[in-house]
Image (cartoon, helix red, strand yellow):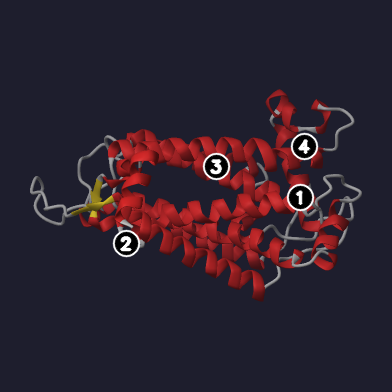
Amino acid sequence: MSKISNILKERLGLQLLEYPVPAHSNSIPYSLGGMTAASFGLLVISGILLAQFFIPDPERANSSVHYLMDQIYLGWFLRGVHFWAGEVLSVTIFLHMIRVFVTASYKKPREINWLVGVALLGLMVGLLFTGTVLKWDQEAYEALDHFVWVTGEMGILGLPLTEKFTPGVPLLTRVYMAHISLLPLVTMLALGLHLFYVKYHKLSPIPPSREPGEKASIEAIPFTHHILYLQRAGIGIIAVIFLLATLIAPPLGEQPILGLEVTKPPWQFVWIYALENLWVPSLIAAPFVIGLGLASIPFVDRSSETYWKRRPIAMALLVGFIVLLAGLIIWGSVTTMSHTM
């Protein structure tokens, strides 16, 4: 067995994976990125299978999803896996960014990788939004209606995202192409770059609670041990997704009634629904402000301090942001829309 292992290492270069990493990498907080990657991988696989049954045309899109759910063997389970993988990914990527912020892993020399992570967050939001639109029920139609309003307000900058840019091609078809080709391709490239910088800069250490300048000893393990831990974590995440897909069917309405506005967006977007009720241009301003704020963090916080207890302002801002976001989600869930697009 050992001889076979050595042959595989020599032929495949597996020995290159035995470089040392900190022992704390084998923990849930430092494996949230790997869990997110596992959910994304499941999204890609299930998405490829779902694409075999979906018809990206406004007249047939909704009925094709219903056909998948009702007529295709285990079609309900396949769609459930895709839906819940996106839900789980939404949670793990948010927790991953919180961990990175709390441990100050965005600081020198990892500023660029933080920016890549922010870009990945934006791409995941784009995938979630386009995926919501594709089922083409009332919720999906209203989501696309809001998107059309935003692109209209952007003037010539928003033109490539409108139906006018490609006359005769339904916007739903273009959303579908973005969902299955452009966004996944860019996401995979960004994910590869993200992993490259993790390898290049090494996994960030646990911030020392000692006096400034005093370093803690760092126990190391082979990266192959961390891969085994990530495999177990990934299997656990996939098991949760499969269980949720079995027990809870994802929402699906009927063909939309154009011009009607009666639904609320998925929980990932309810916060902006609440802001829209206060000020409609929040649809444009809020994502821009949040994106700019996240991107500026490593350039505003230039101190060398990484221990969270000695970063009271940063921690207060984090708690404030989480409380505000949770409050907007709760408020958006109970309030009603005070205007129409």
Residue drawn 63% across and 46% down? 127
CB under 8 Å between discs 4 and 1: no
Residue on which disc 3 sits: 122
The relative height of residue 223 versus residue 333 in the rendered view (above or below) is above
Please tell me the numbered disc located at residue 174: 4
CB under 8 Å between discs 2 and 4: no
Residue drawn 73% across and 58% down? 337
- State left or right for residue 149 relative to residue 186: right
- Label 2 residue SS: loop
Say which of marks 2 and 3 sits in front.
2
x and y, in percent, of residue 21 in the image: 25, 49
- State left or right for residue 2 relative to residue 216: right
Residue on which disc 2 sits: 27
Q: Earlier in the sequence, mark 3 or mark 1?
A: 3
**Where, quadrant-wise, is the N terminus in this rendering?**
bottom left
Please tell me the numbered disc located at residue 134: 1
Q: Amino acid at mark 1?
A: Leu
Mark 3 neighbour class, 10 Å CA radius: few under 14, some 14 to 19, many 20 or more: some
- State left or right for residue 2 relative to residue 152: left
